[in-house]
Image (tube, rainbow, N blue to C red):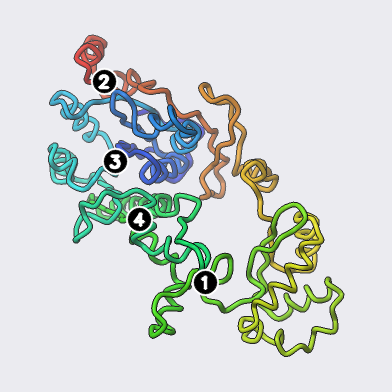
Amino acid sequence: MIVEPETADLPLSGIVVVDLTHIYNGPYATFLMAMAGATVIKVEPRTGEHLRHRADAASAGVPFAMLNLNKQGVTLDFTKDRGRRLLLKMVEQADVIVENFAPGVLDRRGLGYETMAQIKPDIIYASGSGYGLSGPYRDYPAMDLTVQAMSGVLATTGFADSPPVKAGPALSDFSGGVHLYGAIATALFERERTGRGRKVEVSMQEATYASLSSSIGMYFAHPEDGPPARRGNRHSGMAESPYNVYPTRDGYIAIVGNHDRHFQQILRLMNRPDLFEDPRFLGLRARAENMDDVDQLVGGWTARHDKESLADLLLEHRVPCAPVREIPEVVRDEHMHERGALVWQDHPQLGEIVVQRSPMRYEGSPPTPLKPSAKLGEHNREVYVEWLGLDESELESLYADEVI
């Protein structure tokens, strides 16, 4: 496999990844690998992975494009014996295999770690799943929503007087994907030192758990009170105030006052020096105990301003805050575009869209040029003929036999 010149000095340059993943979890892990210089071969069923099918009924075309930048795309039906043999031939020349099928699926097809390690002893075999490869929940169907429910995210999101609410982003999927990337990179580091391959796995549930630390802290501080209540936009540990989302004339603004001087600056900007010695507001503990009064005071003030100009004013006075931005504002964020974290791309199927680079940056290496997600089976010939060494007649036979 030819290393692209623009990725030759990146940390994972020369590493070949066979990507059997779908939807969000696994594809994000392999996207991060591609952005670190690895050659990633995305293997899809002949009809395409699940996220392509979602695009027919929803807006999944853009997510597919975002998560599959800079990957080579091939099709393969490895439920057929010939397809299975072809996949194992790819394993012989690969460094990493990544999959996020339900636990046991690839083992039943003779494509588990034990089989692949016999063919390539130093292979890194990475498995992402909802609940892990062992334990009572192993075979539970896992999607981001169900993992959020099982991990406590839903129970801690929303307002106390309303039903649980899922986190807007696919929190568990992407947390699992980031951790899966970390496990793969760690295993590659070990292989570099020892020459040994390894199987690694990441559970979305386990990857999500630590993000609940504030709510878990509340529970252990007061276990007699039972589960911590949902706090809406307030601090999960109820330890800071102001800490909320407040109304403005044209939307909302998030303000955090985690230090006395932050609140004092807000009072100065409000022209309320008379409240400096108000016992309700003296110190973090007092403000936390009187947060309804704090929120009423701050919210009444913010409602008279526009969110962007108010954010500028507060930031000028070193008060942590941010305007609550809608998606059209987020994709045009001037800071992220200035840093090259977001890029406008003329996608061959989707037109002008905004795509992201990896959040991981490698000093001394220029940003990797972004290549659009591949059409279904776009790189079949490059991978099967130019990399694996099949001849043209074999390629045509694979098409004719509906293996690719």
**Total label count?**
4
State the residue position of label 1: 236
Q: Amino acid at mark 3?
A: Asp
In this orientation, which residue lies closer to the viewer: 145 or 331? 145
- Nearer the observer: mark 2 or 4; the answer is 4
State the residue position of label 2: 404
Determine whether label 3 and label 4 are within 8 Å by CB. Answer: no
**Quick one: SS at disc 2?**
loop
- Please give the name of the residue rendered at 31% of the width and 31% of the height, measured from the top-left corner: 43
Mark 4 or mark 1: which comes first in sequence?
4
Mark 3 or mark 1: which comes first in sequence?
3
- Would residue 69 be seen by someone viewing this image from the given angle? no
How far separated are the C-alphas under marks 4 and 1?
Answer: 20 Å
Mark 2 or mark 1: which comes first in sequence?
1
Image position of 230 with respect to 306: above or below? below
Q: Amino acid at mark 2?
A: Ile
State the residue position of label 3: 95
In this orientation, which residue lies closer to the viewer: 365 or 286? 286
State the residue position of label 4: 147
Left or right of 291, for residue 217? left
